[in-house]
Amino acid sequence: MKTSPWFALALGAVFVFGEIVLASALFRLQVLNTADFREDQAVQTKRRVRTPGMRGRILDCKGRVLADCRPSHGIRCNLEEFQRRGAASNTAAAVDLAVDRLSRAIDLPRQITSAQIARHLRTASAVSLVAWQDLDDRSFARFCEHANEFPGFEDFTEVERVYPNGSLAAHVLGYTGRGELEGFEDDPVYFSGKEIKGREGVERFHNGFLTGVPGEATVWVDARGFQLTRERKDLIEDDRDGDIPPSPGLDLTLTLDLDLQRALEDALQDVTGAGVVLDPQSGAVLAMASAPTFNPNDCIPRLSSAVYASLTNAPMKRGQNRAVSEAYAPGSTFKPITALAALKYGWLPDDEYDCRGVYRLGNLRLHCWDRFGHGPIAVRQALEQSCNTFFCNLGSAVGTNAVLEAARAFGLGAPTGIDIGGETPGVLPDDAWKRRAYNEPWYPGDTCQMSIGQGMLLVTPLQMAVVAATLANGGRVYRPFLHARPEGDGPVKPVGTLPFPAADIELVRLGMKDVADKGTGRRILLRQEPPAPGTYRRRSFRLNVDGAGKTGTAEIGRGETKRKNTWVIAFAPYENPTVALAIIVERGESGGSTVAPRVHSVLASIFGETETTSARGGSNQLEGRD
């Protein structure tokens, strides 16, 4: 059959058209879309792993290390070596069996469960599985001896947090744990190593400052998503993507003084309580302690259930920073505030009240510590003697609002804003608060109770340290802070100023000086040692500077649960003070006998003390009353 020339021509045109289509498709695939396919190939064969940067150190005000990083050895498993055909559970079982074999061979308890292995295979098969971390030197050496017998396992070194001073400043520093790098959760190309993250204290509050900048490294994977060995990766392509090394975080310098911190913690080592030492000219925290304490190294590399229980279980609650997160009735340490409120609203410095040992208001009876009464007494002497009836009368005379106004001027009833977190505002009660909390109105007796630091009034040790610092500097209220300011930033500006005349503030300061010189807080300035066996004289030591203070004892509970929380606020030297502090001891006897000697030991660590004339033994001449 003879073919028509038109048919041959049409057939040829079809073939030419097909060649053109094929050529254009090849051009599009091999030239125009090369970048897209390379990107798809990268998604399929490459993973970028974010590696955390080293965490910055924490230093005291003199550059001494409070928190650092140390090398930590571990063992990890390269999952590609244990791939099995079929279900992913087959590979998980192979890894689980290998971990068991290695555990028995080097006599090392397992740190990873079967469920964790299976979860890692599902979510992060491109990166190695950490089987053991933070090994001691002996366990790490045993693995190194047997490493050749266990292909697929290798050692690695990372960094962990370490606190070289143990429990010192534990509540300020807090502790750390491991957490995922943030910001890359939805990116399919990226995996992230776990970085050190602050969990409590300044470690948590300043986490962003301390955290380093993550680096990046390339990992090659096969079709199933398992990381390739170096040999198999070289068969595919050289790694042309440069790795980016991580950058370390910044060092954080605190206002704490390590020596003063140690002195404060020594003063609290056998009790439950807290203390804060401030620079009254700026608000810088020189020392902050809570007792009982804990060792943050016990929380590294992970917080075990046993350690967590020891930190949170009552009544010890070792992990609680009582200096900022526990609120107490301030007792008589509140009386300087009541005195300033009364002086502002018409009470004169020489106005007297006749103390007869008990204050009567309707059915309310409030006793003075001197059951026979102090007799006629004015503001300065009332502060020295800590006369309850005088201040009950004072509060009633000027009214609730005047006392509340004075307390708010010192910052009570609100967080101070310190850079540590976990701060409670305390309670500065009024009629509206009481109606919300108890569905009851405010009574005149509530004002009396508040005027002597009792009743529903609650403050933190940090807030009372701010009160002491504000009285010390003559009325400037500073926000306490822990992160040291860079040199050259200039003086710290106060956040407020007391609305009281300078003469009234000085009168209260003089009353507090009398407390330390001859009143309920004599042990703030003077220390006595008991007579040596066979002798009748005590050795007495006096602080090398003058100071001022106020003692306080707040009764809590009733009946068998009744107890006393004992206080002292103080500052020194009296002229141009450089230190202000507040210390509370739970379940003490009195502020004068329980806390004042501890305040003396802290101040003596700063200013020193000198032996004075010995006194005869017998009754305790410095026994505190309030």
Image: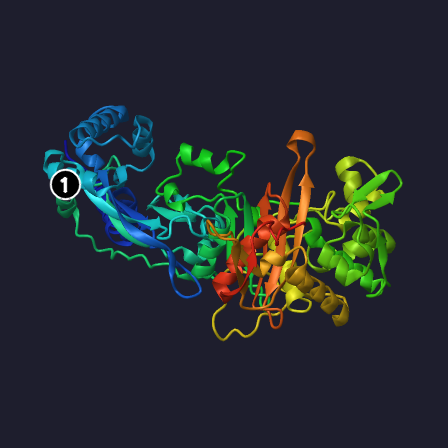
> 10 Å neighbourhood of mark 1: few (<14), some, or many (≥20)?
few
Q: Nearer the viewer, residue 350 or 408?
A: 350
The percent position of residue 447, horizontal first and vertical second, equals 81, 47
Observer able to see residue 135: yes
Type of amino acid under label 1:
Cys
Going 17% across and 36% down the picture, which residue do you hit?
152
Q: Residue lying farthest right?
A: 362
Observer able to see residue 336: no
Going 54% across and 75% down the picture, which residue do you hit?
490
The percent position of residue 602, horizontal first and vertical second, equals 51, 58
Q: Which residue matches tag 1?
A: 144
Q: Secondary structure at mark 1?
A: helix
Lateral position of residue 345 relative to residue 535, left or right: right
The percent position of residue 209, horizontal first and vertical second, equals 44, 58
Lateral position of residue 209 relative to residue 498, left or right: left
Please determine whether, in this image, residue 616 is positioned above or below residue 3: below
Q: How many marks?
A: 1
